[in-house]
């Protein structure tokens, strides 16, 4: 049994964006998905729960909701973090 944690504490958007993320991950991975505050935890078996696949799926979610210019996905040992990009202002 593999458990992957996605820290979405910096994720901001319209409505219940974390609930939308958990629904998207459940649909794409087929694993058991639950939310704990601002964290989404995916539990299951097989290739659909490799760190690489979950990371790509989170990136697809950000792209679908047009958030790729504002947020990026960073991987730690057992956790993926959705971080806000630092946008430099050009004068």
Image (cartoon, rainbow, N blue to C red):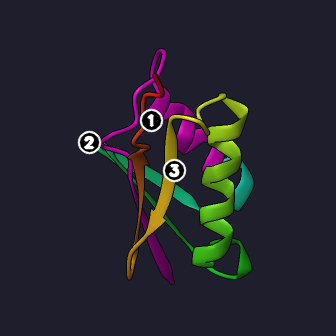
Can residue 30 be seen in the rendering of this structure? no
Residue 20 sits in quarter: top right
Q: Which residue in the structure is indicated by mark 2? A: 37
Write down the region rendered in magenta. Answer: 1-25
Q: Residue at x 59, y 36 (%)?
A: 69
Q: Which residue in the structure is indicated by mark 3? A: 72
Is 90 displayed left or right of 53 in the figure? left
Q: CA distance from mark 1 to mark 2?
A: 9 Å
Mark 3 vs mark 2: which is more N-terminal?
A: 2
Q: Residues within 10 Å of mark 2 (few under 14, many from 20)?
A: few
Q: Percent from the top left, x then y, of residue 10?
A: 33, 40
Q: Percent from the top left, x then y, of residue 60?
A: 71, 47
Is 38 displayed left or right of 80 in the figure? left
Mark 1 vs mark 3: which is more N-terminal?
A: 1
In the depicted structure, whether residue 61 falls above or below residue 90: below
In the depicted structure, whether residue 78 falls above or below residue 63: below
Question: Which is nearer the eye, 30 or 83?
Answer: 83
Q: CA distance from mark 3 to mark 2?
A: 20 Å
Q: Is there a contact, CB below 8 Å, between mark 3 and mark 2? A: no
Report if residue 28 lies within the magenta region.
no
Provide the secondary structure element on which disc 1 rests.
Answer: helix
Can residue 51 be seen in the rendering of this structure? yes
Is 47 displayed left or right of 87 in the figure? right
In the depicted structure, whether residue 21 falls above or below residue 66: below
Q: Residue at x 30, y 43 (%)?
A: 9
Question: Which is nearer the eye, 45 or 87?
Answer: 87
Provide the secondary structure element on which disc 3 rests.
Answer: strand
Q: Residue at x 39, y 78 (%)?
A: 78
């Amino acid at each position: 049994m593999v458990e992957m944690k996605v820290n979405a504490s910096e994720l901001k958007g319209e409505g219940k964006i974390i609930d939308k993320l958990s629904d998207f991950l459940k649909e794409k991975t087929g694993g058991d998905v639950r939310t704990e505050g601002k964290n989404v935890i995916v539990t299951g078996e097989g290739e659909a729960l490799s760190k690489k696949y979950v990371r790509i799926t989170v990136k697809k979610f950000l792209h679908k909701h047009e958030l790729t210019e504002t947020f990026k996905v960073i991987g730690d040992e057992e956790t993926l973090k959705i971080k806000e990009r630092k946008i430099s202002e050009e004068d």
